[in-house]
Image (tube, rainbow, N blue to C red):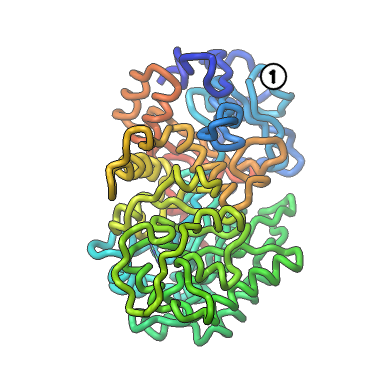
Amino acid sequence: MGGFLPGGAFASGEGPRVDRRRLLLGGAGLAAGATVTAGWTGPGGGHEAAGDGPVCHRGTVLHFTGDPGDREHGNAHTHLFEDGALVVHRGHVVYAGPWESRPPAARVADHRGHLILPGFIDTHIHSGQIDAVASPGGQLLPWLKKYIYPAEMRFEDRDYAAQASWDFLNILLSAGTTTAAVHTTTYPQSTEAFFDQALRLNLRMVAGKVLMDSGGGTVPDAYLDRDWRHGQELTRDLIERYNGRRGSASDPYGSSRLCYCITPRFAPTSTLRALKAAGELYREFAGKGEPVWAQSHLAENRDEIDLVMDLFCDAFPGRRLRSYLDVYDRCGLVGPRTIWAHCVWPDHEYHPRPRKCRHRHRGPARDRQVLRARGAGVSFCPTSNLFLGSGFFRLHRTRDAGVPVGLGTDIGAGTSYSLLHTLGDAYKAVQLGNGFPDRLPEPRRHTLTALRGLYLATRGGAEALRLQDRVGSFQPGMEADFVVLDLGATPALRRRVEAAQSVHDRLFALTILGDERCTVATYVLGHPVYQRGHSPYTPFRA
Ligand code: GUN
Ligand code: ZN
């Protein structure tokens, strides 16, 4: 493929900041004394040692410092350098900008012709479902019972959990994903296995043990926490051992990248006491200045919501239950660093079946305002919403309400680990959402642009998880997790990209036709951890 962005760029002068200098081909322009490396020297080798100088990655560099869809500031949030440089020192970004203006570097990794983006951030995924992805038939509740609980129960076996977590993380890296918000399983050993493997790879991961103390006859007793108190004790122990854990042999800079996430599966599998205990833990650690994260599912499926309203309608005496979100909110679980998956039907924006109880639940629609006021984030999981027939997430309404949104694969209901592939379904879900349940008038119809999509997959995820001061963009000081993408990875994508007339066209083709095959290399804290052609199934040796 020729340069990444031959020709056009943005048609008018009104587009995002684009450095229009054409991408150079060949080796001209390297700093005197610099060495050119291919960027990859195999697992465990070629890592930038602590004493090494800065490394300059040359290629087309794109990152966001805010939402490009923001009406006022969108353009200022977009940073694209056709002939760009990303300079990394001691695992952190020191410079992202035009090649010509780069600071001195000891080495140059030449990625010309490829796109360098911040590592993708998957805001909702289940490590315990690695072997249940693509299990057919049924909407959420029967699907969970038939496939998911049995699959997650295999994680009781520590060896299985260790190997599965290792494979899971390597699959993520092969898709260019460097940070994820992960539900493990109810077994604490599966959470330990996950964190231990993430620590070996030095990843910034947000994860937690699943809390479930009530199955309503759908969850095998053996897969439930003994009781709410036991679930809380196990969670506290894991927080104390893993949240912000410092240093390791492979972590020479003493950074602490593991983030504990309190993880009640969803309201129907928790007692009210367990949800309150989860909220108490979340607030306790925030109060101690050692904040933890929290995550769950919210308003994904209409049968699920009806169930929640039946289960919890009398739970808060004297106060009418307003919505599904209200359950979590009254338990003190909704706040900064909390991420809510799906949110397809906030305020039950559908015609609910008549309640068994005597209450009327349709109060004013306020869920998005509550999420915004609490500083909580939402995970948009389009492949999962389509696979389980859950519905269409209202991306624009949610963003317009000021709620941070990231993208989630939701493996195993989701059908791809690749956030590029997920963006393809996100685009289609937004298109279809214009017509369901009612056809929206033309001025109220929306579409998902490539820039906004790539923002959701990177910086948007970081904002939803409140990690934007660490990952998700290339501002100086950020942790240097990034992915190198090939827009000529498949014949179909290559031809489409070569025929494209503008940067938007090329990036749009990437979001519709791209997937993990586009990942040339993935870097974590400046170290190469994946390279195309090397199996992601690196044998795991305990
Ligand atoms: N709601 C509760 N558990 C799950 C799960 O594992 N996947 C999805 N998609 N929704 C859920
Ligand atoms: Zn999920």
Q: Is residue 289 above or below residue 510?
A: below
Pick the front one: 235 or 526: 235
Q: Is residue 415 visible?
A: no
Q: Taking 223 as reference, is 50 left or right? A: right
Q: Position of residue 478 (x, y in %)?
A: 68, 41
How many numbered marks have been drawn onto this rendered protein structure? 1
Q: Is disc 1 placed on a helix, strand or loop?
A: helix
- Residue at (61% x, 36% y) in the render: 65
Q: Nearer the viewer, residue 413 or 98?
A: 413
Q: Find residue 305 and report its horizontal and vertical position in percent.
A: 38, 67
Residue 299 visible here: yes
Q: Residue at x 37, y 79 (%)?
A: 358
Classify mark 1 as within 8 Å of ligand 2 or not, answering yes or no: no
Amino acid found under the numbered disc labelled 1: Ser
Q: Which residue: 40% across, 21% down?
A: 1
Return the x and y of residue 395 as percentages of the image width and height. 43, 45
Instruction: Report the side of 318 relative to 488 (left or right).
Output: right
Instruction: Tell me the quarter of the image containing the C terminus.
Output: bottom right
Circle 1: is it few (<14), some (14-19), or many (20+) Cα within 10 Å? few
Does residue 206 sit above or below 417 in this rendering? Answer: below
Q: Is residue 116 above or below residue 356?
A: above
Can you give x and y, in whole percent of width and height, for residue 419 in the image? 43, 45
The quarter holding residue 289 reads bottom right
Quadrant in which ligand 1 is drawn:
bottom left
Location of mark 1 (residue): 101
Task: State the residue lying farthest toward the left.
Answer: 137
Quadrant in the picture for residue 116: top right
Q: Nearer the viewer, residue 542 or 347?
A: 347
